[in-house]
Image: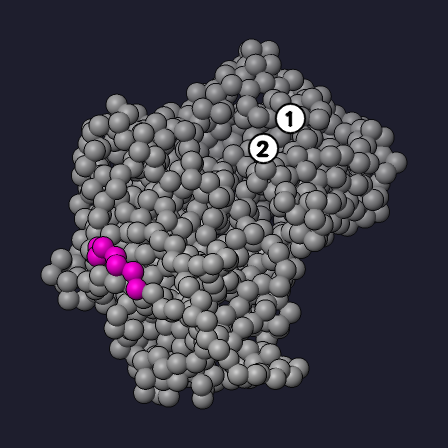
């Protein structure tokens, strides 16, 4: 899954926290890694910087002249769309939008802006070079006498032009080249906005007064902003159809405030492309309809405005706007070359009422040139996004994300040898990429930085040297990561320090791990817990050592003596989480005591493909209402413990998956391809008093994908087989859910121990309509709620030997009759909540079964 701006390191920490807490409370967050999938990375320092930057304000001038305004009729006050706004040399201009609004900027020293439109007197306005200014320009009607005009019905000329653009898309699409290589310069910047002057005087802001010198104003919506992050990347991009391959080599990278090298791979060109010729433009994991989509007439209204020379080429000027409200569309303008019908330039914004969370504005500009290959080629790409938790407000801290990409030095139809494209990664970072000098950047960058952009590097370094900044960093790290950073160790997480269940009573837990200050290769971890009811101590000790972070290779081991819930999903509550004490539907009385030693070695062969070899020795003790009774010679014999020793080999393949790597953890940014998991396990009899021999094989596939303009879908397929005679705790216990919180990886209406098998096949499918249905209901449209449907099926069997080997819990049944459940939900309630109604469609006569229930969850998504 692609995402834009995978760079703001602090936001990634927030996303990771959202993801972790979501798992702990049965919530599956699709985005937020993908949230503020959007796009970002591993430390907390920039997030802290953005947070306190949001308290700053001020006015400042710069070397760029920015003008934002509106053109209206001088007599009626009505907006004048399609008016021309330009500077004196006519090389820099803009056109007013459908509501008369416009924005224009220049680095040249102009002191006058001109406005003209047919039927009105042209007007010249004096401006102050180098500052942001807003203006309303009232044009006076010219009173021109026109001859009689006869209008006959006919086809909209803009639609005629659009059809010709669509007809020639295959020729003009940049992917039509057989091979292409070029140099790419990418600049990414993040700015805190909605800055309030009153907060500049707050006492705790005094050490950071110097940052006010960097405040500027945006022409997207007129907001003042403070730059807090900038990156520059210079790379060579290679693309070929035959032999097939695509690779980017990053030659130089410069990033302010980020100490994680893995971010560099996302600052180039390969993962941030917007192709106007595609029918859908993926932004924030949603499909926006391109204005030149094959079916664009079903989504847009088009207007042919003008024709004129642009850079020596005669072009048509066409504007467009959506036909309906709250669809994922754009409004803006295109310049089309008159003979090739290729896009010469575009300037468009996401519609203001689109059903999109956390985004106030998104503007996109692209410019194309006709190169030696007689094809129009993208040479400049600019996108800016205004993010905020609450849209359309100037009172709450938000931030801008900008990305500028410039392409040059093109070489066409000269593919490299096959071996060149067989790199295990599609982004290669040269060893000296992050050590280039200022002199190198002065000559290598494709456009010079403004004075304020150049100052961001120095400003960020200065902020980090303020002692109070370290305090802010530690506070926000604890808030978002869950751990208190204390020198060489981290204590926490705080939300597991207190919990309670039926077996332990009130449970107190103290845990922690070593910090990066201790080591960036070795991490030690552990915890100790005590229950007031069972009056027993539990504990865990472990370590992880990494030989290499990319590709990831390392080993770890640990010893655990603690409670565990058998049959819980991978997304379920951890039983020592405080949330688990408040959101349960049933008492937590099915826990087991586990004594386990485990070790593993992980070897990533190339990005997305890895093997993990594991050894695990477990002793499983019954606790609470759980009992282990095995039948031998027809007699049931209670067992005090079940002992196993197991080796396993895990294989995972996620084609073109991307990660953001910290020192020990990494966050998957997803892939557009299916993710395949395969696991084989063997139980070793007699080894360390192991009692059982068995073979287990498990395979799974999961995939996320957009469905045209109808939302997005996801499926999870899993199948497994166990060979051997085993007691029920060692069989496949189908993951249940005994909470009120929705769990995408569990059968939400099954209790723990309700279904078990040694052979099974399961399938989960969900579709999120993203407002497709409710957007068309006037009373619901304003709420921006979204509908989701889902269903899950399970079929399996249990051998007679396994049925007769142990005494099953009273509720445990088999899968000779398939199990089904289905549900419908409302998400995006207050942007963070989701409610699901789920029905059990089979096994409805099971004693004590819930055949219907309502579930809640947190759900963060754009």
- In the image, residue 427 lies at what x, y percent? 35, 64
Q: Secondary structure at mark 2?
A: loop
Which residue carries the number 2 mark? Answer: 25
Residue beneath the point at 31% across and 33% down:
197
Front residue of 403/597: it is 403
- In the image, residue 835 lies at what x, y percent? 68, 38
Q: Is residue 191 left or right of residue 38?
A: left
Q: Secondary structure at mark 1?
A: loop
Front residue of 557/385: it is 385
Residue beneath the point at 55% across and 64% down:
321
Which residue carries the number 1 mark? Answer: 583
Q: Is residue 661 above or below residue 346?
A: above
Residue beneath the point at 31% across and 29% down:
199
Residue beneath the point at 62% across and 63% down:
323
Q: Are marks 1 and 2 in contact (CB under 8 Å)?
A: yes
**Magenta segment:** 124-130
Residue 137: quadrant of the picture: bottom left
Which colour style is shown? one colour
Q: Is residue 82 left or right of residue 92?
A: right
- In the image, residue 783 lies at what x, y percent? 63, 42
Front residue of 859/611: it is 859
Q: Is residue 430 above or below residue 359?
A: below
Q: Is residue 154 above or below residue 560?
A: below
Front residue of 649/378: it is 378
- In the image, residue 576 lies at what x, y percent? 54, 25
Q: Is residue 157 magenta?
A: no
The disc, 1 or 2, on the residue closer to the chain's N-terminal end is 2
Q: Is residue 157 above or below residue 85?
A: below
Q: Local crowd at mark 1 within 10 Å, few (<14), some, or many (≥20)?
A: some
Residue 613, label in figure? none
Residue 248: quadrant of the picture: bottom left
């Amino acid at each position: 899954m692609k995402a834009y701006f995978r760079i703001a390191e602090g936001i990634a920490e927030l996303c990771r926290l959202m993801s972790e807490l979501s798992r702990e409370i049965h919530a599956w967050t699709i985005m937020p890694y993908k949230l503020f999938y959007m796009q970002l990375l591993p430390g907390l320092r920039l997030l802290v910087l953005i947070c306190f930057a949001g308290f700053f304000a001020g006015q400042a001038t710069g070397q760029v002249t920015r003008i934002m305004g509106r053109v209206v009729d001088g007599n009626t006050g009505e907006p004048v769309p399609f008016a021309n706004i330009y500077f004196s040399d006519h090389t820099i201009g803009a056109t007013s939008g459908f509501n008369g609004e416009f924005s224009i900027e220049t680095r040249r020293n102009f002191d006058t802006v001109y406005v003209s439109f047919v039927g009105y007197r042209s007007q010249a306005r004096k401006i102050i070079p180098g500052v942001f200014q807003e203006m309303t320009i009232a044009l006076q009607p010219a009173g021109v006498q026109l001859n009689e005009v006869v209008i006959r019905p006919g086809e909209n000329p803009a639609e005629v032009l659009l059809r010709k653009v669509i007809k020639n898309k295959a020729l003009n699409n940049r992917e039509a080249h057989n091979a292409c290589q070029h140099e790419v310069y990418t600049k990414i910047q993040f700015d805190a906005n909605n800055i309030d002057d009153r907060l500049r005087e707050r006492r705790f802001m005094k050490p950071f007064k110097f940052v006010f010198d960097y405040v500027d104003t945006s022409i997207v919506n007129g907001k003042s902003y403070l730059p807090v992050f900038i990156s520059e990347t210079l790379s060579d991009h290679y693309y070929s159809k035959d032999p097939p391959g695509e690779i980017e080599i990053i030659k130089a990278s410069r990033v302010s405030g980020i100490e994680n090298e893995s971010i560099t791979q996302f600052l180039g060109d390969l993962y941030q492309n917007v192709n106007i010729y595609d029918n859908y433009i993926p932004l924030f994991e949603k499909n926006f309809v391109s204005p030149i989509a094959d079916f664009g007439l079903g989504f847009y209204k088009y207007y042919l405005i003008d024709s004129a020379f642009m850079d020596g080429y005669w072009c048509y000027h066409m504007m467009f706007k959506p036909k309906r409200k709250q669809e994922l569309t754009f409004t803006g303008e295109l310049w089309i070359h008159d003979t090739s019908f290729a896009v010469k330039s575009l300037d468009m914004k996401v519609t203001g009422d689109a059903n999109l969370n956390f985004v106030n504005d998104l503007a996109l500009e692209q410019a194309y040139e006709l190169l030696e290959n007689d094809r129009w080629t993208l040479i400049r790409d600019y996108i800016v996004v205004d993010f905020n938790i609450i849209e359309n407000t100037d009172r709450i801290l938000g931030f801008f994300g900008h990305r500028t990409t410039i392409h040059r030095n093109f070489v066409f139809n000269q593919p490299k040898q096959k071996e060149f494209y067989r790199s295990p990664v599609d982004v290669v970072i040269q060893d000296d990429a992050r050590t280039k000098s200022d002199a190198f950047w002065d000559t290598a960058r494709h456009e010079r930085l403004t004075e304020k952009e150049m100052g961001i590097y120095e400003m960020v370094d200065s902020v980090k040297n303020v002692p109070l900044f370290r305090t802010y960093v530690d506070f926000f790290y604890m808030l978002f990561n869950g751990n208190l950073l204390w020198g060489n160790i981290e204590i926490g997480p705080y939300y597991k320090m207190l919990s309670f269940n039926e077996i332990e009573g009130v449970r107190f837990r103290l845990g922690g791990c070593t910090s990066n200050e201790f080591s960036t290769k070795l991490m030690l971890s552990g915890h100790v817990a005590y229950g007031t009811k069972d009056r027993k101590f539990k504990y865990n000790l472990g370590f992880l050592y990494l030989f290499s972070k990319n590709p990831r290779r390392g080993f770890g081991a640990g010893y655990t003596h603690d409670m565990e819930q058998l049959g819980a999903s991978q997304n379920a509550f951890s039983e020592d989480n405080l949330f688990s004490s408040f959101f349960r539907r049933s008492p937590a009385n099915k826990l087991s005591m586990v004594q386990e030693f485990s070790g593993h070695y992980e070897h990533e062969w190339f990005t997305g493909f890895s093997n993990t070899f594991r050894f695990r020795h477990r002793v499983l003790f019954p606790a609470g209402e759980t009992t282990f009774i095995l039948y031998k010679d027809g007699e049931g014999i209670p067992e005090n413990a079940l002992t196993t020793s197991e080796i396993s080999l895990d294989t995972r393949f996620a084609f073109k998956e991307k990660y953001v790597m910290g020192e020990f953890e990494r966050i998957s940014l997803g892939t557009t391809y299916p993710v395949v998991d395969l696991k084989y396990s063997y139980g070793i009899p007699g080894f360390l008093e192991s009692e059982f021999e068995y073979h287990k094989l498990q395979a799974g596939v999961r995939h996320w994908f957009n469905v045209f303009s109808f939302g997005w879908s996801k499926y999870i397929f899993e199948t497994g087989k166990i060979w051997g005679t085993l007691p029920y705790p060692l069989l496949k216990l189908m993951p249940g859910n005994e909470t009120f919180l929705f769990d995408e990886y569990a059968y939400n209406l099954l209790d723990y121990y309700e279904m078990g098998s040694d052979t099974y096949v399961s399938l989960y499918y969900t579709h999120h309509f993203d407002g497709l249905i409710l957007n068309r209901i006037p009373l619901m449209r304003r709420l921006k709620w979204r509908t989701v449907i889902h269903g899950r099926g399970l079929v399996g069997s249990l051998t007679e030997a396994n049925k007769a080997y142990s005494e099953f819990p009273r509720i445990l049944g088999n899968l000779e009759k398939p199990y089904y459940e289905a549900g419908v939900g409302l998400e995006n309630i207050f942007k963070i909540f989701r409610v699901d109604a789920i029905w059990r469609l089979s096994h409805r006569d099971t004693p004590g079964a819930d055949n219907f229930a309502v579930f809640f969850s947190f759900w963060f998504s754009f």
